[in-house]
Amino acid sequence: MTGEDSRSVAAAIDIGSNSIKMTVARPDGAGGIEQIDWASEVVRLGQGIDQTGVLDQERMDAAIAALTRFEAQARERGATRLVAVATEATRSTENGPAFMERVQQETGISVRVIDGLEEAALTFRGLSATTDVSGRLVVADIGGASTELIVVNDGIMLGARSIPLGSGRITERFVLSDPPTLDELASSEGEADAVVQRAAKSLKLPRGQGARLVIVGGTGEFMAKLVPDEGAIAFNDVKNVLAKLGVLTAAELADIIEAPEARARVLPAGVAIVAAIANRVQPVRIEIARSGIRVGLLIDAFSGRPISTKAMPAPAKSPRRGKVTTEQVETESGSKNPGSGQEPAFRAVMRTLIGQRWTAVWKAIPAALEGTDIEGVHDVRVASRRLRAAMDIAAPVFPPGWYTPLHREAKQITSALGEVRDRDVLLVALQADRENAPVTEHPGIDRLIGRIESERVTARAEMERYLSLLLKGPLKKEIERRFENAASASEQRGHAQRREK
C-alpha cells in the first residue's frame, strides 16, 4: 500500500431493505479500517415487495433523498471514492434496475446490485477484520428482506446461503398488531424456523457442535440493548427479549433502543428470526457484531480489489468551514494536530457530549431511588443508553486505560436497572390483562402478579443498593474530572452567547 493510499478516505453505502447505511473511513495500516463518520436512515425500501413485486414510489423517493444527503456528507468528510451496493429489495423487484438508473442520474452514485453469495462474502470479509472468527461459528446477517447465513471453521468460510427471510417481510406477513400479540410472535418464529430448517441441510448448518452464533446488522445491535449482558447472550435471553417485545408498542420500543419507530416496528420479527436460528444451531453463546458488509467493501476498496467506485470531487468552499481536507478530517477524528496545542475537535466535542449525558444520568437517579413513579427507573435507563451510544462512538479517540472502565460502568448502569424495569412493565401488562379477563381467571393472574411483585422487591433492593453506592462512590468525581468540566464549560459558553444576543 502506497503512502498516498494509506491517507485516502473512502465511503461505503449499503442500500438495504430496511435501512440505508454509510461508513466513511481510511485504512488503519493493519488491513482494517479507521472509521471517520457514519450515517443511517430507515427508508423501508423493501416495504410491500412481497405483495406487489415492485419498489414503492414513495420509498424510492425517500431512498434518493437519503443517498443525496449521504453523498454530500461523504464528500464533506474528505472521501475521494464512494462504493455502493444494493441487496435483496432491489435485486428481487421488477423495477429494481430502473431505480438504480434513477439513483445514478439524480445522485451521481453508481450502485452495484450484488447477489446473496457476494453479500455474504463481503459481510464475512468485514467481520473477519473486527471479530474473532476462530473455531466453529455461524454468522447470520439479518436484513429486511433476506438473511445471509455463513458457516465458518477456524476463519475459513465453508459455505453461505441467502434465504428469503427478513424482518420486514415477516412483519408484513404476520405482525399486524402494535404491540404484537403472542400468536403473531409465535407465527413469526414458526415461519422463520421453517425457512431456516429448509436451508440447514444444504448449508450443513451445525447443530449443538460447540458453535458460536454471530448476529450481524441492526437486529443484533438493537437486541443487544434489551439483554442483561451483551457479552454473554444465551438462547433464553433471546426468548425473554421476544416476550418483552410482546408488551411494548413500537413507539415505546423506539424510545428504549433509540431508533426510529419504523425500525422498532420490525424488530420483533427480527428477534424471532434470531430465535429460530439459535434454536436450530444450539450455540454455546450468541454474539453481536457491528461490522459487516460496509467494512468488507472498504477493505476491498483500500486493498485495490476490482470494485465499482465513484471518484468524488473536492468539496466546495463554505464561508463557514472552508474546504474540507484530509488533514482537517484527521483532526476531527481524534488524531493529533501537530503544533496546535489544542485538543482535536472531534474528541473535544465528544468529551463535552459525554459529560452532558453523564449529568443527565446523575439527575435521573434520585427519582429512580424514590420509587414513587415507575418511570423513574425508565428515565435512568434511557439516559444511560444515550450515554452508552455517545461513549461507543467516541471510544477510538480516548486512551483505553481510563476510558474503558468508565465505558464499562455506563453499560453496567443500564443492566443494573433492567430487572426492575422488566417487572414494572410486566406488572402493568398483567394488571391490564386482569381487568379484561373473566373472574374465574383472576386467582391465577393474582398468583402470578404476587410472584412478580416479590421478585420486583428483591430486584429493587439490589438496584437501590447499586445506585446509592454509585452516587456516593468515587465514580462521580472521576467523571467530573474527565468529562463534566468540559460539559460545564460548554454550557457556560452557551449562556454567554445567549446573553450577548
Image (cartoon, rainbow, N blue to C red):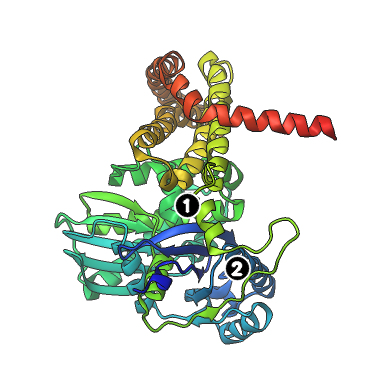
Residue density around tag 2, few if under 14, some if 14–19, many if 20 or more, within 10 Å:
many
**Left or right: residue 15 compared with residue 191:** right
Q: Position of residue 295 (x, y in %)?
A: 40, 65
Q: Find residue 96 and report its image quarter.
A: bottom right
Compared with 157, 334 (above or below) is: above
Element assignment for label 2:
helix
Q: Position of residue 327 (x, y in %)?
A: 53, 60
Q: Is residue 437 visible from the viewing direction of this image?
A: no
Distance of label 1 from label 2 (alpha carbons): 36 Å
Q: Indicate the amino acid at tag 1.
A: Pro
Of the image marks 1 and 2, the number of the one nearer the N terminus: 2
Say the numbered circle drawn on residue 75.
Answer: 2
Say which residue label 1 marks. 268
**Residue at 39% over, 70% down:** 3
Say the numbered circle drawn on residue 183.
Answer: none
Viewer-nearest residue: 196 or 288 = 288
**Residue at 32% over, 69% down:** 125
Looking at the rendered image, the quarter that the N terminus falls into is: bottom left
Q: Position of residue 8 (x, y in %)?
A: 46, 69
Viewer-nearest residue: 303 or 163 = 303
Q: Indicate the amino acid at tag 2.
A: Arg
